[in-house]
């Protein structure tokens, strides 16, 4: 049984998601990233935001990762996985996580704080809807831990949404 508290390993892997977000931003995308790990903590995949080059408004890192993961991995394996995300998953991404069947989510920046940072930016009209509310509407549990390291996560967005 997994703990409902963040471990030292969780913080390391969350910071890895921050590094993926920095890489995505360096490649011309929005600064969001995620890391999917197996039950033993091994990394299964990393995914940065994919807004560019097509200006795909649904190219959020975790939505893209969940599409890839649900094609590659059986549901029973995904149930035991953890998705580390630089920012709280939006309603679309929480839905993708739910449908893929990932059992645990650890995130940095809260959706509410992200909305305060992005404002009404046309490329990120952030929803103020906690992922816990989306998961609670489902028929299977999804453990959520976060926000964590929120100031570090917020720093990824310095100067981006002006």
Image: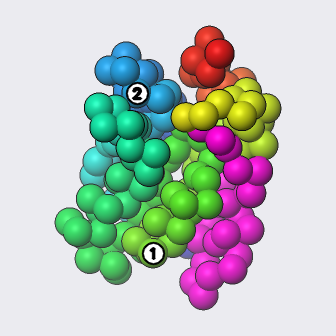
Q: Quadrant of the N terminus?
A: bottom right
- Give the residues drawn in magenta, as a range: 124-147
Q: Is residue 161 above or below residue 119?
A: above
Looking at this rendering, what residue extends furthest in the left direction? 72
Q: Is residue 67 left or right of residue 105?
A: left
Residue drawn 62% across and 12% down? 159
Q: Which badge, 2 or 1, comes first in the chain's sequence?
A: 2
Please name the residue that numbered disc 2 is placed on: 29
Looking at this rendering, what residue extends furthest in the top direction? 159
Please name the residue that numbered disc 1 is placed on: 99
x and y percentages locating residue 21 in the rendered image: 45, 29
Q: Is residue 14 magenta?
A: no
Q: Quadrant of the C terminus?
A: top right
Is any atom of residue 15 visible in this view? yes
Q: The residue tagged with tag 1: helix, strand or loop?
A: helix
Residue density around tag 2, few if under 14, some if 14–19, many if 20 or more, within 10 Å: many
């Amino acid at each position: 049984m997994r703990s409902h508290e963040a471990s030292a390993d969780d913080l390391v892997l969350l910071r890895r998601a921050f590094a993926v977000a920095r890489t995505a931003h360096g490649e011309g995308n929005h600064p969001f990233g995620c890391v999917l790990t197996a039950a033993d903590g091994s990394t299964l995949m990393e995914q940065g935001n994919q807004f560019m080059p097509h200006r795909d408004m649904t190219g959020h890192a975790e939505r893209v990762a969940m599409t890839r993961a649900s094609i590659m991995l059986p549901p029973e394996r995904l149930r035991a996985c953890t998705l580390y995300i630089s920012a709280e998953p939006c309603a679309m991404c929480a839905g993708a996580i739910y449908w893929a069947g990932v059992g645990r989510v650890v995130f940095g920046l809260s959706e509410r704080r992200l909305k305060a940072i992005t404002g009404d930016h046309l490329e990120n009209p952030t929803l103020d809807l906690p992922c816990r509310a989306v998961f609670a509407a489902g028929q299977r549990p999804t453990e959520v831990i976060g926000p964590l390291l929120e100031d570090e996560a917020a720093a990824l967005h310095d100067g981006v949404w002006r």
